[in-house]
Amino acid sequence: MSSGVLRYDKMVEDALKGVLRQALRECENGLPGNHHFYITFRTAADGVALPDYLRAKYPVEMTIVIQHQFWGLEVDRDKFAITLSFKGINERLTVPFAAVTAFADPSAKFGLQFQPPAGEGAAAGGEGAERAPTPLPEAPASNEPADAGEPADKGQVIALDKFRKK
């Protein structure tokens, strides 16, 4: 090591991204029980591939829900790809793990928040703010999507602001 400083913050961040990676790998063929995932990611990050209309609607950050209807989940070391339905249209998304800012599984009351890579702006907590696994409130009893006109089994985008530390 040239700097003589151990980067524990980076080691922890890499380990936590490993939790997300492993959870997705274990669910490539479907989620067990009541598990469902909320994954928030920066839409403008390098390597993120999504349709232009979704990038226009969510220019900074987007949250996807992986639950009943998803197809072709592929997970590798640096990214995952998945097909989700948006207003009845199946779309393929590719998300590098470096772009992910939050992961939650409300059925397990489990969540993680990730720091952006150095040089991409300070997170809400600022440089060096500690981000640890965050217990989540109980999942809502209803599986109603945010858009009342959408069937409950369609993929949906929701805001996770109520889960974030302020």
Image (cartoon, rainbow, N blue to C red):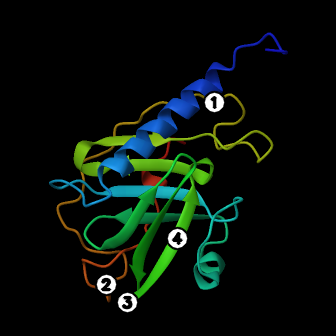
Mark 4 or mark 3, whichever is nearer to me: 4
Judging by the rendered image, the residue that carries numbered circle 1 is 129
Disc 1 or 4, which lies upstream in sequence? 4
Disc 2 or 3, which lies upstream in sequence? 3
For the question of whether residue 127 can be seen, the reply is yes
Disc 1 or 2, which lies upstream in sequence? 1
Disc 4 or 2, which lies upstream in sequence? 4
> SS for tag 1?
loop
Vertical placement of residue 86 versus 36, above or below: below
Judging by the rendered image, the residue that carries numbered circle 3 is 88
For the question of whether residue 157 can be seen, the reply is no
Which kind of residue does numbered mark 3 sit on?
Gly
Mark 4 or mark 2, whichever is nearer to me: 4
Judging by the rendered image, the residue that carries numbered circle 4 is 93
Mark 4 vs mark 2, CA separation in Å: 24 Å
Disc 1 or 3, which lies upstream in sequence? 3
Image point (29%, 45%), residue name: 137
Judging by the rendered image, the residue that carries numbered circle 2 is 148
